[in-house]
């Protein structure tokens, strides 16, 4: 015996059917909502805002005052001010620190149960990673703007490239930071321990920062360290940012930095999504 179910005239069965088959909001809506959630989490804790701004400001002050006079002879061919030489590097290295915090924040969400609740909802897991990366990129953008204002007001930062060159260097630093964010998100999605994540991050950060052209010209480095610095991807990013800021001949430096960043972003995103899909 076969029973045929028909929808009542008021359409209530159709509504229930639609509810059972609802697959969630659009990808754009998910990314927007989750990005807002990550930003609100930062704004609710003023300590995060204050310390995320203080750290790069302290680094800017220390490096500009410690190395300024000592290195003026080495950079005279590029600019007459060490702060003009230093700021493009500070923009890039600040982005690295912010990228590391993205990985740490992801592990925190894994431990406090937020991601477990997300997995029970009709949410594409990839949008969680995209939202976190965008929220952290927005926070980094604010950090870099504050740094530029402080360098201009306190230390007389006035690069030869003017506003156009400065904005170009700022955008390049944001792109580099975003690509490294995906690398650290990939590491976090696999290691899943804050202590390990921080150790791996700092182990990667310091060679990237100091074995490069960030703070001193390559010619001022020892021979073996100069070889390492020439193959360091951060050197490409710093040199390209510096060329834009100081109105130096750009050449292929910017394209090398963009290509390296794009490669890191794609590889990082692939491994981040794969690692994130594993059971918690």
Image (spheres, rainbow, N blue to C red):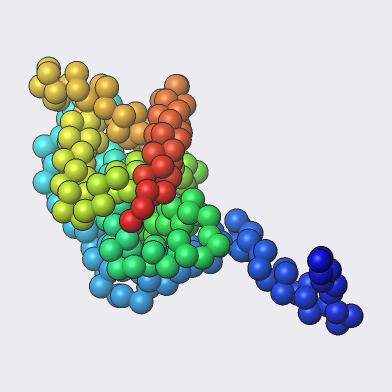
The structure residue drawn at horizontal position 50% and vertical position 43%, both measured from the top left corner, is 164
> Is 250 on the left-hand or right-hand side of 5?
left
Above or below, 21 relative to 252:
below
The structure residue drawn at horizontal position 42% and vertical position 72%, both measured from the top left corner, is 40
Q: For this rendering, which residue is in front, 190 or 135?
A: 190
The structure residue drawn at horizontal position 33% and vertical position 63%, both measured from the top left corner, is 109
> Is 133 on the left-hand or right-hand side of 58?
right
Report how many numbered discs are placed on residues in the image.
Answer: 0
View extreme (right): residue: 9
Quarter of the rendering containing residue 206 = top left
Q: Tell me, yes or no, if residue 112 can be seen here.
A: yes
What percent of the width, then of the height, locates residue 247? 42, 33
Q: For this rendering, which residue is in front, 266 or 148?
A: 266
> Is 12 on the left-hand or right-hand side of 257?
right
What percent of the width, then of the height, locates residue 47? 25, 73
Q: Tell me, yes or no, if residue 166 can be seen here.
A: no
What percent of the width, then of the height, locates residue 6? 85, 72
Q: Quadrant of the C terminus?
A: bottom left
Q: Quadrant of the N terminus?
A: bottom right
The structure residue drawn at horizontal position 45% and vertical position 28%, both measured from the top left corner, is 259
What percent of the width, then of the height, locates residue 230? 25, 21
View extreme (front): residue: 1
Above or below, 237 relative to 90:
above
View extreme (bottom): residue: 10
Above or below, 40 relative to 260:
below
């Amino acid at each position: 015996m076969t029973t045929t179910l028909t929808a009542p005239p008021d359409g209530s069965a159709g509504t229930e059917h639609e509810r059972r088959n609802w697959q969630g909001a659009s990808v754009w809506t998910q990314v927007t909502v989750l990005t807002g959630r990550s930003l609100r989490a930062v704004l609710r804790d003023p300590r995060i805002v204050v310390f995320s701004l203080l750290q790069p400001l302290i680094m800017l002050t220390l490096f500009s005052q410690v190395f300024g006079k000592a290195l003026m002879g080495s950079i005279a061919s590029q600019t007459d001010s060490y702060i003009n030489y230093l700021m493009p590097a500070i923009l890039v290295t600040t982005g690295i620190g912010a990228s590391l915090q993205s990985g740490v924040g992801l592990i925190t969400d894994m431990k406090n149960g937020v991601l477990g609740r997300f997995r029970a909802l009709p949410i594409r897991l990839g949008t969680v990673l995209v939202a976190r990366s965008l929220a952290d990129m927005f926070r980094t953008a604010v950090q870099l703007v504050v740094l530029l204002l402080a360098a201009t007001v306190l230390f007389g930062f006035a690069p030869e490239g003017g506003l156009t060159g400065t904005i170009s260097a700022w955008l390049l630093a944001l792109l580099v930071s975003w690509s490294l964010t995906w690398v650290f998100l990939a590491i976090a999605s696999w290691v899943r321990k804050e202590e390990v994540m921080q150790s791996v991050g700092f182990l990667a950060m310091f060679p990237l920062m100091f074995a490069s052209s960030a703070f001193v010209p390559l010619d001022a480095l020892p021979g073996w360290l100069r070889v390492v610095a020439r193959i360091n991807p951060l050197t490409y990013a710093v040199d390209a940012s510096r060329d834009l800021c100081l109105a130096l001949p750009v050449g292929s430096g910017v394209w090398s930095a963009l290509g390296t960043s794009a490669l890191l972003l794609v590889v990082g995103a692939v491994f981040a999504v794969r690692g994130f899909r594993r059971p918690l």
